[in-house]
Amino acid sequence: MPLGSGQTVLIVDDSPVMRQMLYKMFEREGFRVVGQAADGEEALSLFELHKPNLTTLDIVMPKIRGTEVLEQLMAKYPDSCIIMASSVSDARTVMHCLKIGARQYIIKPYDEGKVMAAVKKALAI
Amino acid sequence: MSVSDENLAELFEQYKDEVRETIGTLDNELVAIEQDPSSSETIFSLFRHMHSLKGSSKMFNVDNIAGIAHRLEDLMSMIDKNNAILTKHPKIIDLLFKGNDIFRDIIAKLEDDISYTTMTADHAAFVGEIQAQIEKINRRDSQLVDSARKLVEDLEAFLPSMEETEVEHLKKDIQELNNGLAIVTLEEEGANQIRFNYNGADLTDDVRAMENMLAKFKDGKAGPEDGRAFVASADHLYNSLADVATEDAMSLIAELGDGLSLFSERGLEMDQMMVEFFAAMLQELKEKFHVEVETPAVKASGPSKSQASAKEPQVKTIRVDEAKIDLFLDSVGKLITKSEILNHLQFSFRQAGIDTGLLRDFSTVSRTISNDIVNLQRSIMEVRQVEMNNILKKFPRLVRDISHKIGKEAEMVITGERVPIDKSLLDDVEQAMVHIVRNAVDHGLEKPEEREAAGKPRRGTVNISVTPEEASIFIEVADDGRGLNLEKIKSKAVERGVLAEEQLPSLSDKDAAMLIFNSGLSTKDQATDLSGRGVGMDVVMTNLKKWNGDVLVDNHPGRGLSVGLRLPVTNTLLTKEAIMLRVGSSTFCLPLEFVNEIVTVPGDAVHHHKDGAVFRHRDMVISVIDLKGLLGLADDEDLAAAADIPLDGEEGLKSGVKENAIFIILRGKTDSRQSIRADEILGQQKIVIKEFELETFRKLPYFNGLTLLGDGRVVLILDSEKLLDS
């Protein structure tokens, strides 16, 4: 049974290969990827456009950092479901993101199992 | 439920492309940061690229790149927090350049050996170098701490002799300074046991217990009870610290507590992420204790190496293999030939007197098909295009390396990175540009002192601009150096036997400048390792000619040299417009681009010498290449005519024997005045060039391929360059 039943997903990562990898994972699980953003600015405007059910958010990106994107989104849409997916593993950042409202935080490298486990938990909250 | 093998193998190609691109960007940013070490924007960008490189390399288990990028990321992160570091330690930039070269090397080796993903001794040594640099920077900081501490001690010694209130005041200050410096005692018990104390509380057991459990989690040997035990230890640590900690340590401990509750609240499992999180947390706590302990390297639980490197056919990819496009183009080529058959049929129908209405329909259909095919070909050609940036991004680095090596200052200015170019041209264009740019820095630009003396800025400029034109692109490499010394080039050309002394007076400045591309003259720097290929300029130029490229030189003595390359946007090798001509009883075709003009000359205007024939056209004397002689063609008619020709010098006119003759004046690299004679021009059509597949044919001296005509005949294609050289 695929996890997603047409729920919309926005993927945010500055690396095309990472986006492609997440895209494949989500499509395979029955999600609908409605947007892929390569930087923070794009992430904000694509979020406004699609209001996705789920967003995966990288942190170190050009223009606006992921943490700032998270802050802005949480301020405006406190119920949005955001999973941080980054290779930033420093305790402070992880904690900060979880504290201000990220549902889950996965650290690169991740695989499909880990991503989907986080998705499951994030959507269940 | 994991990324399946073939998906990963497919993404691996994309990963390598991405790393290659990052390497190019890094090169340019490094050149930029060298010129302006305080640019925080560039520093952050460098940090970000190292970070991404680490992240994606970890994902594909390319441990060597991940490891090096990780260390360089640490270094960049330090610089990001304090820009002044780069100014104080300029060697860091060399280190970063070296790192980028190692990345490049690894990616190249991965092409042949997909298991080249582990750290070699060299890689480890390089990581050590980075580590040493980081420590060097840190030492500076700890020196600061030491001197602050010394100050505190001195003040304490001085205290007894001071007034009471002042003493209280100072004591408070010292206390704060002490707290700020996170005064922590560290005592050693035995040789290898380090104990952790914080303001009198012994935390060693908690820290050790947590470390042991983290190790278990890392090995995947931990069960649910270990998770609970871990949380208990962390809790205990938190409580012990809470009693004794100073304010700044408290905030860290509060974070640890928050972390614990957040994790249990969100239902996060004790997976690799938790391990990393708490490892980082512990590391931070230990740093508060001033105990240097290496962060445990967490082994990726991602897909295994053999999966990532599996060499499987990439069936699902949307990246298209270049060979497949070529195959497709080949089919389009065949279609073009087929549509020529339609044209031929149309011609035959008309000859046979077929009903005109029917013929009109047929020709409409035939024309539509032909147009569709041309469009099809054009769009597939566009698929093959890539941006010029693919080549251009390496030049700032190249210019930097050369100028550093020879003690010059040079700046690279590039415009037109996004102009498209056919992918198949990339390698040859790049080779040519490397030569030209290298020459510009090596020979064109003067040394800084010399430039100053000439009233120029110390730093020279090499300007690359790419301009799209209608069917071609124009690449110009211009420097503001000394320009060419044509007299010196000329005398060198004579000295080396490239030119005869008596040729000099008639040599135009333009032709003299072109001598720099002559293999006999451009030998000086061929042995250097800067281009790394050892291909001579003459070879490079021949390669460009192959693509119908053109080279232009614009020399301004004392002010600089500009070398221009004009290239077709698409690879036009495959189909060309050509004229069909009959010579004797043979049919040949000649691509239109080699035709300057087709002229009809009265038979008596052609003068036959013993060395050949010439005729006069628009005040120019045009010589006639003896095609029949060269190709060994003879037909009876011609032989008979030849017998009548009195071959006795300039007066040897052959008059009134023949009617008008047709000459095709060829287009060559210089103002060519040569022509070939055709007995008949049969028409003009689109031909699909087939290169000779058999070695025997490739040796044919005056042809460069063959084509299939609409009526099924095979016709050889004349090679104008070789004819001109004959």
Image (cartoon, rainbow, N blue to C red):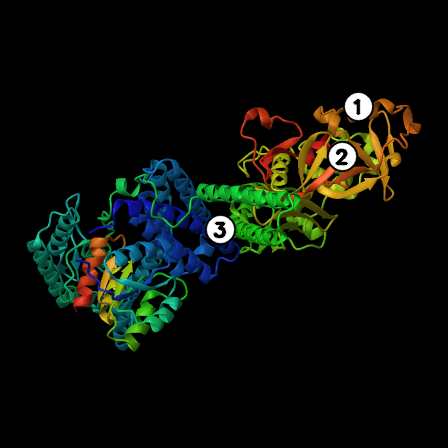
Q: Residue at x 17, y 54 (%)?
A: B271
Residue B277 in view, yes or no: no
Say yes or no: labels 2 and 3 on the same chain: yes
Q: Chain of mark 1?
A: B
Q: Amino acid at mark 2?
A: Asp
Q: Amino acid at mark 1?
A: Leu
Asked where in the image residue A62 lies, by quadrant, the reply is bottom left
Q: Chain of mark 2?
A: B
Percent across and percent down for residue B165 are 27, 77
Percent across and percent down for residue B86 are 45, 55
Percent across and percent down for residue B574 are 57, 42
Q: Nearer the viewer, residue A70 or B633?
A: B633
| Residue assigned mark 1 | B639
Residue B30 in view, yes or no: yes
Q: Residue at x 14, y 44 (%)?
A: B190
As drawn, the label of residue B679 is 2
